[in-house]
Amino acid sequence: MTIALHGRNFKPEAQPYIAQMLKEFQQRGAEMLISKTFAEFLQPLELFPSDCIVYDSHEELGKPDFFLSFGGDGTLLEAVTHVAENETPIVGINTGRLGFLANTSPDELNTMIDALYKGYYTFDDRMLISVVSDHDIFEGINFGLNEFAITKRDTSSMIVVHTYLNGEYLNSYWADGLIVSTPTGSTGYALSCGGPVVMPQSNLFIVAPVSPHNLNVRPLIVSDDSVLSFSIEGRSKNFMVSIDSRSKVIDSSVQLAVKKERFKARLVKMQEHNFFNTLRHKLSWGLDTRN
């Protein structure tokens, strides 16, 4: 079995579990690839296995059997960009804070390893959103798991996002910005803007304005077969566009559209984890403090 690992800083209490996990993989004869940034973090902790291969690009990564992400949801979003069109199954290990997507805890690592070798898991395929532009805004990594957003810059007044659905005029959003969210992203930025919680396997996009000037403009659900295109105007000539945690400043001359990506993110779901339990435990969904 070939395992890839990527992560960020983790708390000291997680270190013994990760050390044991790496030892267990070695004893089972697994080949391990570690991202360059994660290797640089592990080496001073004396956790870096001597027989591991360090990769520094998507091409060097190749096609491992599983990709392990250590951190929070932000690290898992990075993992999706490492895997890209290879659709390598991703295991999210929560050494961060919330861990909505990365919901395997460090004390479950031995159980996780056993499950991977015995096949005690299922795949949870998630739709990705793709940005189409006449400029290479995101340096070739023009897809994301959660959402695409157009927002004003910090010091500017509200902007107007003229939006078209499959080439037909949809609406002009006078707002601080506009979000196009995947079902996975429905529990993130879009949720804070009044969007609905959506089941992960739903075939749709959520179009949600950020602080709209017109209060009768509400989030809209459209099919994931749709192509949404935009033109932007405002007092400032520069605007912010972001896909997941990656953002760039553009001007109004840049042509933008979003659609469903041709490949998906394949998450590994352990048997004891499900979407509704995660909603209840991580977001306190349905919690009534009176009871």
Image: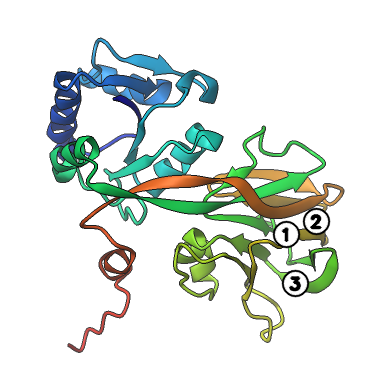
Q: Nearer the viewer, mark 3 or mark 2?
A: 3
Marks 3 and 2, the one that precedes in the sequence: 3
- Which residue is the site of mark 1? 156
Quarter that holds the N terminus: top left
Could you tell me which residue is drawn at 21 percent across and 35 percent down? 117
Residues under numbered marks 3 and 2 in contact, where contact means CB atoms less than 8 Å apart? no
Marks 1 and 2, the one that precedes in the sequence: 1
Q: Secondary structure at mark 3?
A: strand
Q: Secondary structure at mark 1?
A: loop
Could you tell me which residue is drawn at 82 percent across and 41 percent down? 134
Q: Nearer the viewer, mark 3 or mark 1?
A: 3
| Residues at marks 1 and 2, CA–CA distance in whole angstroms | 6 Å
Circle 3 packing at 10 Å, graded few (<14), some (14-19), many (20+), is many
Q: Is residue 182 left or right of residue 18?
A: right
Circle 3: residue type: Tyr
- Expressed as whole percent of the image width and height from the top left, the position of residue 195 reads 54, 74
Circle 1: residue type: Ser
- Expressed as whole percent of the image width and height from the top left, the position of residue 18 reads 19, 32
